[in-house]
Structures are given as structure tokens and as C-alpha cells.
Image: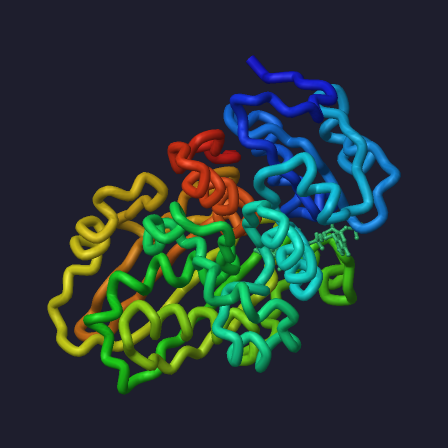
Amino acid sequence: MYVIRKSNLKSDKLKITVALIGASGYTGLELLKLLIVHPKFEITYVGNSEGGIKVEELHPSLKSVFSCDVLKSDAKEIAKVAQLAFLALPHKTSMSFAKELLKLGVKVVDLSADYRLKLDTYEKYYCPHEDKKNIPNSVYGLPEFYREQIKDTSLVANPGCYPTATLLGILPFCEFIDEKYPIFIDAKSGVSGAGKKCSSKTHFVSIDENIFAYNPLMHRHEPEIKEKMKIYSGKNFDINFVPHLLPIIRGEMIDSYMLLKEDGLKPLKILREFYKNEPNIRIYDHPVDMKSPSGTNFCDIFAKVVGKKLYINSTIDNILRGSSSQAVANANIMCGFEENLGIPIIAYVP
Ligand SMILES: NC(=O)c1ccc[n+]([C@@H]2O[C@H](COP(=O)([O-])OP(=O)(O)OC[C@H]3O[C@@H](n4cnc5c(N)ncnc54)[C@H](OP(=O)(O)O)[C@@H]3O)[C@@H](O)[C@H]2O)c1
């Protein structure tokens, strides 16, 4: 039975009250869909940049399902009604809200890049940081690797979509990779990865029946992958990352190629052992596809070794595991709930 809830912007004392800023965006809509039916989170504030509209006018798919006013986002007002805020905002905008919300005692899950990187890396690839103080307090929200730290933090930096799928595939192999040789990462994403604003590249006429690389070897997710691999393994890998845009709405596939120190490695055995207690990682003995994890928080992974060559193939739903469902999983952990509470496990297939 589908749950139909009209305006419920009143706090239920048994639930954690949550705010969503950036409700008109793609990740914002996915967050709404997850939070409306979440058994332990109660949406008490929904905002975007201007407000003055009903949520079902922003997203007609929510008509007769959920209704509330969308407000011009204001951190002080959020702090009056919410214990935790999801920031589905562009980088730079996020930090201005996070800074104030954290000061007012609101926990934050930030979907932007603002707290993902070390300060010098961030400022090199993004912009000057306006909340340096909170960077060391943030935890990178990849639960398989940082679950214990996420439990105790007030600020989660939700990982980038490409880094999520890439790191989940590569990190288990760090000790076996020969760091003398470069790692090549070929990535592909659906167009929702670029956000709702249309550009000449994401225009229907440019992308339909087409595929192209963008920002080859210069994409901002390259330093994120490199930095997280360094933190995890202590090694400085040479990362070469090329993303491509596909004429599909959602989904992401990563193909990574690297050389190992020795031959004879059994990659599927390593992955199965590494992730044996992880419900959101599925290991396949054949190459993975984008549809199978679509609509879920799964990351699907396949790997193959020929001699010293290692190939890793991983897929996720960019607006769920790559952002919104991972954000809800992180919020669940921060609030002491079961990690997968309220997160769908059945894919959008066919
Ligand atoms: N799309 C993905 O697959 C994906 C994956 C991982 C991470 N992310 C990250 O998640 C964040 C959101 O991405 P998205 O794709 O959902 O972006 P989007 O579709 O462009 O939506 C951005 C949202 O931010 C709101 N916003 C912008 N400036 C604001 C302000 N000053 N005050 C309040 N709200 C403001 C917009 O509201 P208005 O409509 O009022 O402008 C809109 O709701 C980004 O940092 C992105 O890099 C995205």
C-alpha cells in the first residue's frame, strides 16, 4: 500500500525533525521521496532559493502524495523546527548554510563538495572556503569506510557521485596496486548528474543519441578520489579520470584500469571477503549494468585480473547511492537508526 500523507509539517515527538534545503533540485526531489515515507524522520522545513510555492507545484509527481509550503531558506528559521538538515545545494551556497546551522545546534548532511576535501585541495579546485573551522569536524560519508566516525559527527560531507562508485571499487585493492603506474578511470553518467540547470551540453539536442567526454583529466572528482585513496592507503596514486555524459537520466558506470604488483590475484574473492558484512555492496561474477542498482542504494561491482592487469567495473544510481540515499543512510547512522531504514532495495527495472 502506498503511503499518502498530506501536509505534516508538525513535529512528531518520537521522530527526528528534518529540513531539506534545495528541494527544487534533482537530489532534492530524491530526498523528498525518501523522507516522505521514512518512518523516523519528519520533514518540518522545505526550502529553496526564493520560496513562495507549494512543493507539489515544484514537483507535480508529489500531487496527492505530500503537500507543504516551500520557503525561502533561512538557517535561523530552520533551527527552530529541525534537528537535522540536508543541504542539496551548490557548493559555496552549502557552506554558508552549514556554518550557521552547526552554530545553532542543527546536524548537517551536506551533499555538496564543501566539506569533502582538505582545505588546500578544496581551494585549488573550487573556491575560497568560508567555513574553515568546520572542515576538520566533517566526516566523509562513505559508510563502508567511515561508519564509526559518522555515528559521532554533526557534519557529514556526502561523497561525490563518481568518487562513491570509484572508491567502493578500488579501495579494497589499494595494497595490491603497483603505484609506480597510473590508474585510468573511465566514467559515465546520466544527465541528472549535472543538476537541473540546462546548459549547451545537457540540452536535449546536444545529448540525445550522443555521448561525449567532459573535463578530461581535469574534473573536480579526480582530486577527491586521489585524496581519499591517499588517506585510506597512505599511497600517492596517479589518478587519470575522464567522465562521459550519456543520453540517459540516471545511473553511473565506472571502468577502472590499473597494474598490480604481482599476478595471480583473485579479485572477486578479495571483494567478497572485504564486503562480506556490507548489505549495500553487491559483487557480481560478470560485468555490471547501470539499471540493476537504479532506484536503490546499492553499488554493484565486478572485477577481473589478467596477468598483472586489474579491471574494476562498478555502477550506482547517481541521484541515490551517489547522493540522496547515501545522505539518508548517513543521517540514519548519525541518529542511531538502522543504516538502511527507509531506503528502497528494489531497482527501477525494466
Ligand atoms: N545530481 C547529482 O547526481 C549529484 C550527485 C552527487 C552530488 N551532487 C551535489 O548535490 C548538490 C545538489 O545537486 P543537484 O543536482 O540536486 O542540483 P540542482 O538540481 O541544480 O538543484 C540545486 C538546488 O539548490 C537550490 N539553491 C541554489 N541556491 C540556493 C540558495 N541560495 N538558497 C537556497 N536554495 C538554493 C536550488 O533552488 P532554486 O530552484 O530555488 O534555485 C535547487 O533546489 C550539488 O552540490 C551537487 O554537486 C549532485
Most foreground residue, 177 or 259:
177
Most foreground residue, 5 or 289:
5
- Quarter of the picture holding the N terminus: top right
Most foreground residue, 314 or 195:
195
Q: Percent x, y for residue 324?
A: 55, 45
Q: Is residue 104 above or below residue 240?
A: above
Q: Residue at x 58, y 48 (%)?
A: 250
Q: Percent x, y for residue 169?
A: 34, 59
The answer to whether residue 73 is seen in the rendering is yes
Figure quadrant of residue 270: bottom left
Q: Residue at x 50, y 34 (%)?
A: 349
**210 on left or right of 272:** right
Q: Residue furthest top?
A: 1
How many numbered marks does the figure carry? 0
Q: Residue furthest left?
A: 264
Q: Is residue 271 above or below residue 306?
A: above
Q: Residue at x 41, y 62 (%)?
A: 166
Q: Is residue 213 above or below residue 341?
A: below
**200 on left or right of 2:** right
The answer to whether residue 291 is seen in the rendering is no
Q: Percent x, y for residue 258?
A: 30, 74
